[in-house]
Image (cartoon, helix red, strand yellow):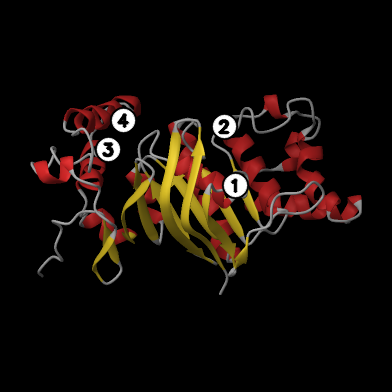
Amino acid sequence: MGSLEARSVWARVGSFLLKGVDLRVRSGEVVAVVGVSGSGKSTLGRVLCGLLRPLEGEVLLDGRPLPEPRWGRVHPVQMIYQDPYSSLPPHREVLDLALEMFLSRGLDRGEALDRALALGREVGLELRALFGLKAPNLSGGQRQRLALLRALSLDPPFLVADEPLSMLDVGLRAGVLRALLRSCRSRGIGLLYITHDLGEARFADRIVAVWDGMVVEEGEAREVLSRPLHPYVRLLSRVFASPLDEEVKEGAILGIIKGGRGPSGCPFGLVEGCEACALGDPPPLREVYPGRFARCQFIRAPSY
């Protein structure tokens, strides 16, 4: 079984810093990386796609260093971006965008068209109805389905989807998510799904929660959702279950954290009433019980 793995990765994009992150995605597995804006989850996605070189640590594909992206060479990790409005060239026709990756692999136009039409049906995009149209003529959902088609047409073993639903109308999100999951699972593609919403992570096999550039909790999705261990994940679960607007939810979370943060150490120390944690170094990520990891020294395995 193949794997995509980050080992002790440190990386920076502007003010966003990853701090010694370890993470693995296996072939056919869906791993959801959750966290508020600025937590480092998108930076992690860029590192795993090869778009950002780590300052320290390494990224491995099947145990070997991940190759750097090069013009004319298909990269084994493809990215689906958050913004479907700027990720597609506005001056090109939809059909050309759908055929491009097939043609780049040496298929003749007839075979490329057949493959594109079939893949379009799989992801819920009827290409025949879009002949002559350009990307700006499509809805956000159609654009994101087209982006998925283009990524899948390269037969990548791994995909990174960076908040692919966040800019779509609420009514379009479920359909796009189903198409993404169905395509990845049927092909055995490993998927790293980045989101700020724990609700979107319920479909994943595992959840990795990121805060301040560090993994603070990891485990099977159903375990994390039903029994979150770290105070950050408990906070995410509580706030995102409310009917508030998403920006209001994120603002509430950040306000709670900043209000309880000490000058150093764990940002949740004062929130949880532990002054020693707030003033000391952040605790290491540790295995609380088999398969469940958390960055908090006061968490104990639950008694059933």
How far apart marks 3 and 1 lie (CA) works out to 33 Å
What amino acid is labelled 3 in the image? Phe
Between marks 1 and 2, how big is the CA–CA gap? 23 Å
Please tell me whether mark 4 or mark 3 is closer to you in this view: 4
Q: Which residue is mark 1?
A: 53
Between disc 4 and disc 3, whose residue precedes?
3
Q: CA distance from mark 2 to mark 4?
A: 19 Å
Whole-angstrom CA distance, mark 2 to mark 3, is 22 Å
CA separation, marks 1 and 4?
A: 29 Å
- Residues at marks 4 and 3, CA–CA distance in whole angstroms: 8 Å
Pointer 1 with pointer 2, Cβ within 8 A: no
- Point out the residue furthest to the bottom here: 1
Rendering quarter of residue 269: top left
Quadrant of the frame with the N terminus: bottom right
**Tag 1: Cα neighbours inside 10 Å, few (<14), some, or many (≥20)?**
some
In the image, residue 55 lies at what x, y percent?
53, 47
Decide which of tag 3 and tag 1 comes sooner along the chain.
Answer: 1
Which residue is identified by label 4?
Answer: 250
Q: Which residue is mark 2?
A: 83
Q: Which residue is mark 3?
A: 240
Q: Say few, some or many: other residues with alpha carbon within 10 Å of mark 2 (under 14 / 14 to 19 / 20 or more).
A: some
Secondary structure at numbered mark 4: helix
* Amino acid type shown at disc 4: Glu
**Which label's residue is closer to the chain start, 2 or 4?**
2
Question: Mark 1 or mark 2: which is in front?
Answer: 1
Element class at badge 2 = loop
- Image coordinates for residue 199, horizontal then vertical, percent: 34, 45
